Amino acid sequence: MKIEVLKENLKNGLCVVERIVGKNLSLPILDNVLINTEDNFLSLSSTDLEAAIKFWILVKIIKKGKAVVPAKLLSNFVSLLPNEKVILEEKNQSLTIECKNFKNQIQGFNPEEFPIIPEFNNLEYLEVDNEKLCYGLSQIVDIASPSQSRPEISGIYFIFSKNIVKIAATDSFRLAEKSITMEGVSAKGDVSFILPQKPAREIINILSGKEGRVKIYFSPSQTIFELPMKEIQHPAVQITSRLIEGEYPNYEEIIPKKFKTKLTLRRDEFLNQIKAAALFSGKINEVKISVSAGAKEVEISSKDYDVGESHSNISAKIEGEAIETSFNYKFLVDGLLNIKSSEVIFELSKEDGACILKPVGDASYIYVVMPIKAT
Amino acid sequence: MKIEVLKENLKNGLCVVERIVGKNLSLPILDNVLINTEDNFLSLSSTDLEAAIKFWILVKIIKKGKAVVPAKLLSNFVSLLPNEKVILEEKNQSLTIECKNFKNQIQGFNPEEFPIIPEFNNLEYLEVDNEKLCYGLSQIVDIASPSQSRPEISGIYFIFSKNIVKIAATDSFRLAEKSITMEGVSAKGDVSFILPQKPAREIINILSGKEGRVKIYFSPSQTIFELPMKEIQHPAVQITSRLIEGEYPNYEEIIPKKFKTKLTLRRDEFLNQIKAAALFSGKINEVKISVSAGAKEVEISSKDYDVGESHSNISAKIEGEAIETSFNYKFLVDGLLNIKSSEVIFELSKEDGACILKPVGDASYIYVVMPIKAT
């Protein structure tokens, strides 16, 4: 293999594929990147066996071929090169890199030992605007939590119906759901899958800030998220992942349809007062939200006998009845951080039931949180 | 105690004094800040018994007194308050904090239990421009390294003579020295002390970016670095520290007076090529610098049999003889990062002797580094 590539393009591609490369002691081949020539493109691939990333760069190919070299080493080295043409040449599993006044050689491995990243023959896909997908995922991805006993809730649930995709995540204490309008093709009937949390995070990290529509391919056991190149009909980057088996809980059942009290609050001020009360919330992180009958302010308070106590008031639009409910402050902070609007609605339910936090003026996102049960 | 203070001023002071407050399990009183009224000022004090920080704020005093409360808790809480007046009131070792729509109470401790931070009666001091001191310290502070067997080289050596203060640090593999012109008062004869590394770092962190002259007080066992307020004849902040006992090595002896080869190099390019070679430098971090007879470029190379090898060339002004010397790349990187000039001078010595790295156009800083001995 011998190719000519711009340093900046090679650096960008390596920064993407090295993301899932770690130190894999039992299978050291996974520490590497597979470099391959495909038509006029150089492809860079990496995998941790659960997920894989593939990135294409338009290059000048002098001689076709493959190379497998340590991903972090190559990425760290290329980032130090001057912004010039780079010549990569593979001979006998050794990769030579020449760029201006640098000439380096990296010892590689046999490309046959690199795991095959599965591809699909199924050409059907659904399409979502990339920025909407990344933003939506970022609003819910951290809610999912690793669960050995219930692996299905450790991932992000995607459910496509007609031209809407809903994504949801829960850790059984709270739940977040985002609705995103699909572009182009509609789903034929309801289809759904559970994507593990780690590749969901990689989709956000790799695709955020990029224009275009993401194509989502999926089989019963696997999915590919693919962003095409801007000007050429060719994929720019693919994130492939296995899917989580099992059935996602029917979460819509727990979303309350009625509320006892509805508060409309300034988001930043509410977040700040929750954080202040959190400092005095003791071992169970308990922060109390109180609304007196006829009040125009909500009281936020906490008390820890050894440390001290906190009381603050926030002006609010209050609908419904007087109420007093306690929450784990972490759950409220997480929910508020996932909402960017200047005002939020907080709907409190009767009898320790689930409560809803949502942005004002955006029906696409809801955050359901369980209160701390009164003892 | 009851006082009125602006939130921003209180927050700034707490951010400074909380720096040396950690979780001290054996002496929990050290987790606290001592709040005291002094004339028209509120003073905030913290200590880890080795060093202490004291910060003054101009406030409105309603009732004199003292309070001792957890430093991080108070600091975290105050930073969440709105930018308004804050009223602090101490009663029965409990501190009430009122600010706009917040009213909090923090459980405190008996001020009598707070360790006394030693003060001097000696009013003699030397003066250094604060920004020069902070920048100079930042160029050498990380060179010192904890040493049980030779505690004297674990600190920063200050030696004052007439109107110059030299500060130096070494870890026995390399040495850095900075000369700073003193302002105002001259030293009467040579005086010197060894400041521990941690308070030296705190001086940089706390005082950097602030205008004015630092007053340096010292006794045989202790020193105070004091920055005055801008408009009032009063200290703004004091960093007090014990001094390290023992005699600092006569380091000037090891600074070579002659060189075999003198290189003048562009700093950023040199640093980049060292970093690239570092990736192939193996377990002993060995990077080779080679100058051939009559060459106009310096070659930088490294080789690790399992990983690969690196060769790069950097154009340089070369004076003196051909030479080949190896260095631990970390020591070269550290030295280059401490130099901000666009060009550096690298003086290489004969027979594995100490080498000197220094900025072009600035005689105030030298970095002496030992090569890796040829085996």
Image (cartoon, coloured by chain):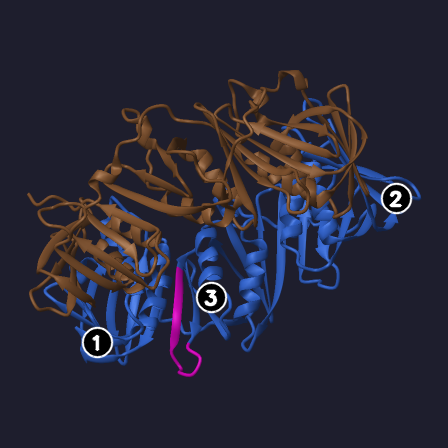
Chain colours: A blue, B brown
Query: Does residue A91 appear to the left or right of A198 in the view shown?
Result: left
**Rendering coords of residue A143 (x, y %):** 57, 48
Q: Residue A3 bears which disc, if any? A: 1
Front residue of B136 and A329 = B136
Question: Compared with residue B301, is residue A129 higher up or lower down, i.e. above or below?
Answer: below
Q: Amino acid at mark 1?
A: Ile
Q: Is residue A104 visible?
A: no
Of tags 1 and 3, the one toward the viewer is 1
Of tags 2 and 3, the one toward the viewer is 3
Q: Amino acid at mark 3?
A: Leu
Front residue of B19 and A307 = B19
What segment carries the magenta color? A229-240
Of tags 2 and 1, the one toward the viewer is 1
Subunit of label 2: A
Q: Which residue is mark 2?
A: A321
**2 or 3: tag closer to the N-terminus:** 3
What is the CA distance from the residue labelled 1 to the residue labelled 3? 26 Å
**1 or 3: tag closer to the N-terminus:** 1
Q: Which residue is mark 3?
A: A207
**Rendering coords of residue B213 (x, y %):** 54, 45
